[in-house]
Amino acid sequence: EPEVTQTPSHQVTQMGQEVILRCVPISNHLYFYWYRQILGQKVEFLVSFYNNEISEKSEIFDDQFSVERPDGSNFTLKIRSTKLEDSAMYFCASRQGHTGELFFGEGSRLTVL
Amino acid sequence: GIQVEQSPPDLILQEGANSTLRCNFSDSVNNLQWFHQNPWGQLINLFYIPSGTKQNGRLSATTVATERYSLLYISSSQTTDSGVYFCAVEWGWNDYKLSFGAGTTVTVRA
């Protein structure tokens, strides 16, 4: 069964460093998303992406964050200068249309020291 | 925005017991999904169920969209069912992102 894959599964970084989280969405999907979950809290929407541009972003998604689809398969989330409060589980998701079932990856745990 | 409330917040079960988790939402939805987050933090898709009833093994779910709630049933629970169960919805028109509830933490004891 096709699945969304994410790398790395866990990354530890120093405050102020740049981090890139990678995702390979399901191959025929056109809509891509990043969500975030701080430990012990709800899963929160960060950003949606379609047709090579951001469709919607939350208040959390400030200038330190960016997303890119550098080729036909990868979808990346970059945090330019990490802060302690960026420590969280980051989930990538994708789906075929702008509505319908959303398929999540297993997550990338980011720890900022 | 839409409010998603899950109950109970915590549930402790003896292995083999049955249980029902509830998700209430404050407005009409065009998508509702249930997820299981395992102890490693991974989110597992359980059901895509904006309306109706579905079953998958020992799990089943029912959404009554007109009354704005969904139920997740766990039958003959096993220790591997432990974790956090999240309900997430997409709200009516022009909202193309999931809003998650706070989750129900389920602990199944052997």
Image: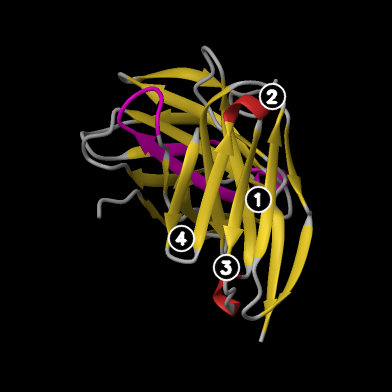
Query: What stretch of residues is rendered in magenta?
Result: A76-100
* Mark 4 Cα shell of 10 Å, populated few (<14), some (14-19), many (≥20): some
Between disc 1 and disc 4, whose residue precedes? 4
Tell me the residue that label 2 is attached to: B2
Q: Choose mark 4 or mark 2, whichever is in front.
A: 2
Drawn side of residue A75 relative to residue A91, left or right: left
Work out how far the residue at label 2 is from the one at label 1, CA to CA, in angstroms.
26 Å
* Mark 3 Cα shell of 10 Å, populated few (<14), some (14-19), many (≥20): some
Mark 1: amino acid: Ser
Q: Position of residue A5 (x, y in %)?
A: 35, 52
Q: Choose mark 3 or mark 2, whichever is in front.
A: 3
Work out how far the residue at label 3 is from the one at label 4, CA to CA, in angstroms.
31 Å
Work out how far the residue at label 3 is from the one at label 2, CA to CA, in angstroms.
30 Å
Tell me the residue that label 1 is attached to: A87
Tell me the residue that label 3 is attached to: B75
Mark 4, secondary structure of its residue: loop
The answer to the question of whether label 3 and label 1 lie on touching residues, with beta carbons closer than 8 A, is: no
Q: Is residue A54 above or below residue B104?
A: above
Mark 4: amino acid: Ser
* Mark 1 Cα shell of 10 Å, populated few (<14), some (14-19), many (≥20): many
Mark 2: amino acid: Ile
Mark 2, secondary structure of its residue: loop
Residue B80: image quadrant is bottom right
Drawn side of residue B61 relative to residue A7, left or right: right
Mark 3, secondary structure of its residue: loop
What residue is at 29 percent from the left and 40 percent from the top? A74
Mark 1, secondary structure of its residue: loop
